[in-house]
Amino acid sequence: MAAVATQCWRGFFTSVVAIAALLPLSGHAHGNEARMVEFLDWKKLPNVARVFGSNRSSFDGMANSWFRPQIRQIEGESCVVGELFGVDVDDKYAFDIDEPVELTLKFAAQYT
């Protein structure tokens, strides 16, 4: 009986060690956000440090999607296409300001 119990424990520990050895290969960190966020290599914009897109939002009423943000050529212009975008304004241009900001966008309705 003791020999059977010892074999069971050895089998159990061998399984635990095998699973533990495989975990680092299958586990992935989510990066800098709990949501999918992609920094987009888009055209250089004045006073913009970077542009990023996401398919998840915590805004009320905004649905999540599986559509990943993309950069496409539309009518000869480089455009970002997707559900949700962010613009990181260069800190040298504007940092911690408490005033209205105006942003002008071109909107391609056929891609919504």
Image: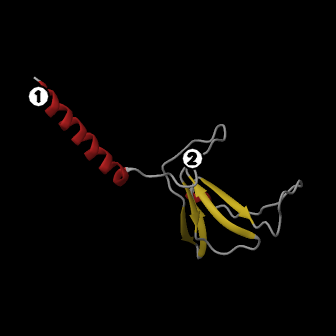
Badge 1: how crowded within 10 Å, few (<14), some, or many (20+)? few
Instruction: Specify the farthest residue to the front.
Output: 2
- Judged from the image, the secondary structure of the residue bearing numbered disc 1 is helix
Specify which label sits upstream in the sequence, 1 or 2.
Answer: 1
Residue found 62% across the figure and 61% down from its top: 52
Instruction: Specify the farthest residue to the top.
Output: 1
Report the mark closest to the observer, 1 or 2: 1
Residue found 64% across the figure and 37% down from its top: 61
- Residue 37 percent location from the top left of the image: 56, 55
Towards the viewer: 18 or 108: 18
Residue under label 1: 4
Say the numbered circle drawn on residue 56. Answer: 2
Q: What amino acid is labelled 1 in the image? A: Val
- Image quadrant where one finds the C terminus: bottom right
Q: Is residue 79 above or below residue 28?
A: below
Q: What amino acid is labelled 2 in the image? A: Arg
Residue found 70% across the figure and 68% down from its top: 49
Q: Is residue 78 above or below residue 28?
A: below
Colouring mode (rainbow / by chain / secondary structure / one colour)? secondary structure
- Image quadrant where one finds the N terminus: top left
- Judged from the image, the secondary structure of the residue bearing numbered disc 2 is loop
Towards the viewer: 62 or 31: 31
Mark 1–mark 2 distance (CA, rounded to whole Å): 53 Å
